[in-house]
Every structure is written in C-alpha cells, then in structure tokens.
Image (cartoon, coloured by chain):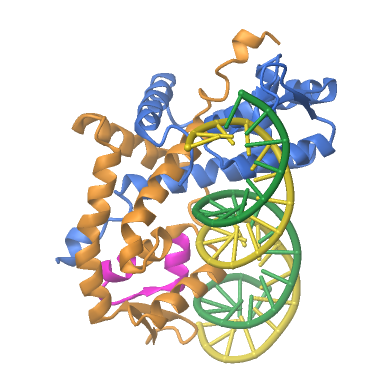
Chain colours: A blue, B orange, C green, D yellow
Amino acid sequence: MDPATNAHALTDDVGFLLSRASAVFVRATNAVLASYGLRARPYSLLLMACSAPAGVSQRDLAETLALDPSQVVSLVDELAASALVERRPSETDRRAKLVVATEAGRALCAEVVPVVEGAAAAQLADLSATEQLILRELLTRLMARGPGASPQ
Amino acid sequence: MDPATNAHALTDDVGFLLSRASAVFVRATNAVLASYGLRARPYSLLLMACSAPAGVSQRDLAETLALDPSQVVSLVDELAASALVERRPSETDRRAKLVVATEAGRALCAEVVPVVEGAAAAQLADLSATEQLILRELLTRLMARGPGASPQ
DNA sequence: TATTGTTATACTCTATAACTATA
DNA sequence: TATAGTTATAGAGTATAACAATA
C-alpha cells in the first residue's frame, strides 16, 4: 500500500484517538485526585454510591462502570478500608450487598466532585459549549451499542 | 447534594464516557487481532513502522503513541521477536535506532488493517458518516491540547 | 548538559476461572 | 439452574528511576 496513503492512518483512527483522549483524561483526573487519596476508578464508584442514598448493589456497580464483579470487590474493599463506603445486606435479596456511602464518603465526594469537574473542564477548554455537548452525545450513543455492561 | 441532581453525574462525565468508549474499542480491536497474534498496542506501533518506509525512531514512536520510551522498548522487542520489525542504526544519530517493518510485517499489516477498520466501523455503525467525522475532529482537537507526547 | 535507548521495579488494570451462598 | 459476591491468579498497561552511549 502507498505509504502516503497511510501516513495518517493511525491519527485518523477513532479507536486510537479515543484511547489517547481517555488516557489524557484519566491522567488529569488521577493527578487532581492524588492529594485526596483517590484515583479515577474508586472515585467513580464513590460517586455512584453517593448518588444512590439507598445504596447500590455491587452488580449494578459492575454493570454501570463496565467492570468485572471481582474488580468491584477490590474497589469496595479499598473504599471501605478508608471508611468512605460500607456494605449493608440487602433486605430483599440475601445474596446481594448494598454499597452505601458513609458521612465521610459524602463529605469527601462533595469536596472532590468540583475539583474533578474543573480538571475535565480544563481539558475541554478548546471546545465550545456546544461542541462539548455534541461530543458527550456522540460518546453516549457509542456507548449504547457497546457491551452495555460486562467486560469480556 | 440532591440525589436526583447527581443521578446522572457519572454518565454525563466526558472523562467517564471516554474511558468506557475507549475500553470498548480496545476490546473489539484486541478480539479481531487475537487470531493474528497481535493486540491493539503492538498493532499501532507496527502500523507506524509500516507507514514510514525509512523507519521511525523509538523516540518518535513514544511521542506519537503517547508511551514511555521504556514501553516502546518492550513493544519493539516483542514485534522484533516475531520478525515483524527490525532495529536499524540511524545514519545521522548514532544514539538512535530506526524501527523498520520487515516484509512479513508489511504483509501482516496489509492483511490486518482492513480487519481492524472493519471492527471500528462496526462500533461506529450507529453514527452517520457526518457524525463520525465530527467525532474524529473533536477528539483530534482534544488531543491537540493534551500532553502532546510524553505520559506523566 | 541533554537526549536516545535500555534495564529494573512496582503498581494498576484487565481477564478468567472456580467457589459459596443464596434465588 | 442461574445469580451475587468472593477469592485467586496471570497477564497487560502505567509510572519511575537510574544507567550507558552519544549529541
């Protein structure tokens, strides 16, 4: 194949662009979270727990975060060790455990959410408000088709 | 904070959407590459080597792929072990080594590029051609600001 | 003094499989 | 028989630091 044709094959590849962009965001997020003892992954789990006052099952966490259930166990263990969340038995399903944010977890979340959003806004600064909306919508629709949940 | 307000905080977060979308693409790409003995990362390096007939320095590979130079060493080692690329001394800089695709590397690349592009197209099937273009452009502009190269 | 490639190390992330207790 | 959570393990990805050879 013609070299000139392929000169930009990589940088035109949506998959490559996505992984680059994702990495940039994760690094920026981890950087601002470091001083709070958090990283992007545990943060997103904490955020979900804080958003659901009644708690979230680990299964729901795995589904929404697209993580393997065993990864959720580790993350919840970690957050529980820091007393940011706790496991409570479900009253309707004795197999399930509900992950609930503690007072400390909610306080940290309230403190840290604007910081993370600020870091994201900085990364998106070159896009207009409309473009940011479009990007969000396109990514959401991309997701709709994806393996809704379980990684494989 | 109001639970209802935060109910979708996570799924509205561009950083989260990017990492989810990126993961979906990488998994799909790895899946179709598996039977060729490749994964997304080595594939992208091979693609760069194939796109530059004169070879690419490892420094350039690290910069374009946003990898640490030490990661590039491992990847080149791996591809070289499969005889898909080889290291050649640079004639202008005796420190540098040029990574050049072998005949086998070019052949595999030619075979595998359409497969990877097909997998990407399948993931993008829910977006119109125009929307795919917009997505690509927005991601590219997002990248422009990012740490052009070196990860940190 | 700075840069290219290299080695080494530690930690995070991803992917599987098997197991338990419930449903 | 299937599902929620758990444990264990291995491999891939990421992040650093230090070093030799060369610029």
Which residue corresponds to the image point at 77% horizontal and 36% vertical from the top-left? A79
Query: Measured from the top left, where is residue B73 in percent x and y?
Result: 51, 75
Residue B151 seen: no
Q: Is residue B7 magenta?
A: no
Whether residue B67 is situated above or below residue A77 in the rendered picture = below
Which residue corresponds to the image point at 46% horizontal and 44% vertical from the top-left? B23
Predominant secondary structure in magenta? Answer: helix
Whether residue A152 is situated above or below residue B133 in the rendered picture = below
Q: Is residue B57 magenta?
A: yes
Residues A127 and B17: in front is B17
Residue B55 lies in quadrant = bottom left
Residues B75 and A42: in front is A42
Image quadrant containing the N terminus of chain A = bottom left
B87 with respect to B125 (left or right): right
Q: Residue furthest left?
A: A2
Query: Measured from the top left, where is residue C19 in percent x and y?
Result: 67, 50
Which residue corresponds to the image point at 18% horizontal and 62% vertical from the top-left? A4
Query: Measured from the top left, where is residue B98 in percent x and y?
Result: 38, 79
Residues A3 and B32: in front is B32
Residue C11 lies in quadrant = bottom right
A19 with respect to A112 (left or right): left
Residue B145 seen: yes
Whether residue B31 is situated above or below residue A91 in the rendered picture = below
B1 with respect to B31 (left or right): right
Residue B1 lies in quadrant = top right
Whether residue A43 is situated above or below residue A49 in the rendered picture = below
Query: Measured from the top left, where is residue B83 in percent x and y?
Result: 34, 82
Residues B86 and B137: in front is B86
Magenta range: B47-63
B13 with respect to B118 (left or right): right
